[in-house]
Amino acid sequence: MTQTAAKKEELSSATVILEKFLPYRLNVLASLTSNALAQIYAERFGLSIPAWRVVATLGQYEYRTARDIAAHGVMHKSTVSRAVSALEQRGLIARRPNEDDRREELLELTEEGREIYEALAPEALAFEERFVSVLTAEEQKVLAALIDRLSGHARLLAPEGEVEG
Amino acid sequence: MTQTAAKKEELSSATVILEKFLPYRLNVLASLTSNALAQIYAERFGLSIPAWRVVATLGQYEYRTARDIAAHGVMHKSTVSRAVSALEQRGLIARRPNEDDRREELLELTEEGREIYEALAPEALAFEERFVSVLTAEEQKVLAALIDRLSGHARLLAPEGEVEG
DNA sequence: TCATATTAGTTGCATATGCAACGAAAATGT
DNA sequence: ACATTTTCGTTGCATATGCAACTAATATGA
């Protein structure tokens, strides 16, 4: 193989085939998924992805601090801060100062916020189901396991820091 | 299960567990990967991800139009336009008007551009290898296949359009 | 042939992003 | 008790993004 390859391409010792390059493919898949989902969040509920993650976290955990939410949703703290401000102004979440540590504030969904969460959650789950419906149940498990292993490993390759919005 | 679930949470009919939500996990993994890789592109070669995709495409295909590159790299045409401008100013790629259709321009790597590509490609491949090294060869194949199936399916769920940068 | 539609690529604009600096509050260490 | 560090959250700033409008060129069709 070195022979035939050498004659064809003297210069490029290594060639990246973008379509086969895993980081690229992961990004494309994630973006496709994200965009499709974001359409639901945005068009039907006026939520950005960070806002959705905040709502989802509070829907899941009742009340949390902004810091918790950032860690849970793997977002930058400034991203969370802005999403929280917007959601508060829309009356979807409420802040309550933590008397034990007045640096932080406890956040929770308002009545209206919970209504949106409860309308949105089933749609998100339905989307997920449609999305993975090309795979068998067994394949879905395998995929989930592979993603987990890779994510754990990737955290080591990428020093520290948060991830997009 | 409906019984126990009902007593615990009267309100939320469905709960999204973010950590188990596939679109979310895909995004986190893709972002982790992307950021780690982008660090190499940026710190060592001053390239953004869109710029890298342009260079990679031209490294792979010799010469292409901006439109081809956008399709190949799944990027918005304005993203490609800007990346191409930057790369041209840095002298890494050259434009040549297509005489048969003067709307478009054929792009190719300059000598210097190819040098960067050839320095970068092995590093990108090495990164990929490190990245997937937690998986066995068999698992890597399975993952690739699952991603392909999901991507094909996702394109149907998400109407049309390009994907981020 | 000429009017209309489509396509390639650019750019202004509004928005979103991460980063770094900041203020306030709490933790740490002497 | 006091100085130093660390932590939570906000915000100014520079940059990146997609979208829509635009120009120039080509294709289509009457």
Image (tube, coloured by chain):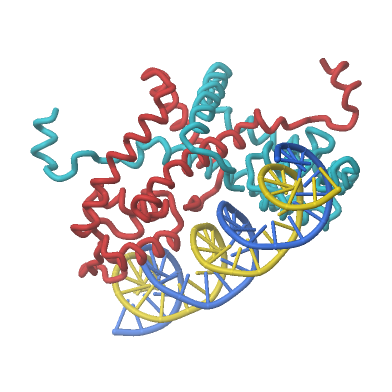
Chain colours: A red, B cyan, C yellow, D blue
Work out which quarter of the rendered image holds the N terminus of chain B and state it: top left
Residue A82 shows in the view: yes
Residue B107 shows in the view: no
- The total of numbered circles placed on residues is 0
Judged left or right of residue A26, residue B78 is: right
**Nearest the camera: B27 or B35?**
B27
Image height of A148 relative to A48, above or below:
above
Q: Where is residue B145 in the image (x, y as percent from the top left)?
A: 54, 21
Judged left or right of residue B53, residue A161 is: left
Image height of B130 relative to B18, above or below:
above
**Nearest the camera: B161 or A125?**
B161
**Nearest the camera: A79 or A126?**
A126
Judged left or right of residue A63, residue B122 is: right
Judged left or right of residue A2, residue A145 is: left
Image height of D9 relative to A128, above or below:
below
Q: Where is residue B106 in the image (x, y as percent from the top left)?
A: 84, 43
Residue at left offset 27%, top offset 71%: A102
Q: Where is residue A100 in the image (x, y as percent from the top left)?
A: 21, 67
Residue at left offset 34%, top offset 40%: A124
Q: Where is residue A77 in the image (x, y as percent from the top left)?
A: 43, 60
**Nearest the camera: B140 or A91?**
A91
Residue at left offset 82%, top offset 15%: A1
Residue at left offset 78%, top offset 55%: B85
